Amino acid sequence: MLADSNLTKVRVNESMLELVEGDITRQETEAIVNAANSSLLGGGGVDGAIHRAAGPELLAECRTLGGCPPGEARLTRGYRLKAKYVIHGVGPIYSGTPRDAELLASVHRHALQLASEHRIVTVAFPAISTGVYGYPMEEAAPVALQTVIEYLRRHSEIKTVRFVLFGRRAYQAYATALKALIVDD
Ligand code: ADP
């Protein structure tokens, strides 16, 4: 594991799992994942930032999709983003029940399955559900990371998964969780 103050990289079989501190709208991965809501019609936080950066064509395409249930994801083009695609994932609204982790794992898996189906080899994720949806960062991080690690172990077609963490505290939470998962291996 290569760990820096704002970059961590680990190899999972043939693929790389990276943590960076930054803004997901500026990523040059082929796809970025949006932390969307079920309507897919835009919102605040990372969703608002992605729609602003992509331009109004993104909302126009989202309107054709008819929403998306929690735990699933839908793919659109990226329009004015550097990323060619946006994968809109709907995470759980935190409830403090075991369903939270199931849905959080599911939305990560679903987003990666869409990437595989569309032959997308580099994907960036934000910390889904940890903003307005209230999922504590320290609880969300191991679930998100474990799910991605398990997927990459079985799917070498995806070459890089990068978590783009907004701010120091988010980065630290994910870096700490990743260290614990790697040590447990
Ligand atoms: P949710 O409704 O799924 O909780 P939010 O957008 O409210 O979605 O927050 C999800 C996470 O995305 C939060 O940790 C928030 O700090 C982070 N975030 C907000 N803006 C950006 C951005 N431009 N790039 C990456 N992460 C972001």
Image (cartoon, grey):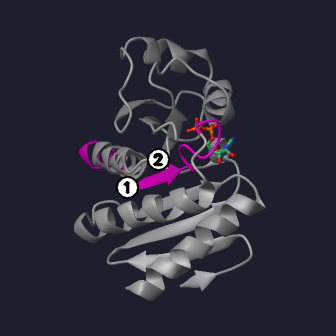
| Residue underneath mark 2 | 30
Do the numbered discs 1 and 2 sit on residues whose CB atoms are within 8 Å? yes
Q: In which quarter of the image is ligand 1?
A: top right
67 and 56: which is toward the camera: 67
Q: Residue 82, position in %: x, y?
A: 59, 40
The image shows residue 40, relative to residue 81, as above or below, that is above
The image shows residue 64, relative to residue 123, as above or below, that is above
Q: Main secondary structure of the magenta part?
A: loop
- Ligand 1 within 8 A of label 2's CB? no
Q: How many labels does the image show?
A: 2
Q: In this view, does 164 lie to the left or right of 120?
A: right
Q: Residue 177, position in %: x, y?
A: 55, 72
Q: Indicate the secondary structure of the residue bearing disc 1.
A: loop
Task: Please tell me the numbered disc located at residue 140.
Answer: none
100 and 177: which is toward the camera: 100
- Separation (CA) of disc 1 from disc 2: 7 Å
Neighbor class of circle 2 (other Cα within 10 Å; few <14, some 14-19, many 20+) is some
- Which amino acid, mark 2? Glu
The image shows residue 86, relative to residue 137, as above or below, that is above
- Residue 119 forms part of the magenta stretch: yes
Q: Is residue 60 left or right of residue 20?
A: left
Nearest to N terminus: mark 1 or mark 2: 2
Task: Please tell me the numbered disc located at residue 121.
Answer: 1
Neighbor class of circle 1 (other Cα within 10 Å; few <14, some 14-19, many 20+) is some
Q: In which quarter of the image is residue 110?
A: top left
Q: Residue 183, position in %: x, y?
A: 47, 87
Part of the protein shown in magenta: 115-133
The image shows residue 44, relative to residue 184, as above or below, that is above
